[in-house]
Image: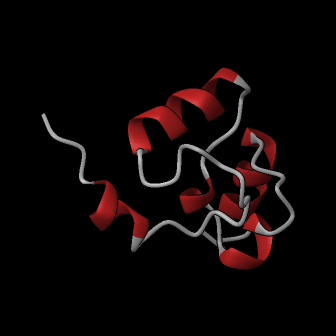
Amino acid sequence: MDCNKDNNLSRCNCTYEPCSRKGVCCECLAYHLKSRQLPACCFPDDVEKTWDRSFETFAGLVGKGKV
């Protein structure tokens, strides 16, 4: 299976500039899950900018109906 990196980049809202995984969703997801986090694309832009991508933050957003 070929990676759709160029297409993925158009939807990637990650603000971490030196990230080598931008657009390579399978690597991004594996990296974040290993740290009990979700990737940037799971969060609204204002929350993503805080770089707190924890499961707990995501659950709080779900509870508030923000995602």
Q: Nearer the viewer, residue 2 or 62?
A: 2
Please tell me which residue is depicted at 47% across the width and 33% down the height of the picture.
27
In-image side of 7 versus 28 (left or right): left
Residue 50 % position (x, y): 87, 64
Which is more toward the observer, 62 or 50?
50
Residue farthest to the top? 34
The residue positioned farthest toward the bottom in the image shown: 46
- Work out whether 32 lies above or below 20: above
Is residue 48 left or right of 31 when viewed as pictured? right
Observer-nearest residue: 62 or 49?
49
Q: Is residue 59 above or below residue 45?
A: above
* Picture quarter with the N terminus: top left
State the image quarter where residue 24 is shown: top left
Residue 23 drawn at (x, y percent): 43, 54
User: What residue is at 82 percent from the left and 56 percent from the top?
Assistant: 51
Rendered view: 28 above or below 19: above
Camera-side residue: 51 or 18? 18
Residue 53: where, in percent of width, then height?
75, 49
Task: Write the residue at 70% across / 37% down.
Answer: 37
How many labels sit on residues?
Answer: 0
Residue 64 image position (x, y, % from top left)? 73, 69
Visual colour scheme:
secondary structure
Q: Residue at x 53, y 39 (%)?
A: 28
Which quarter shows the C terminus? bottom right
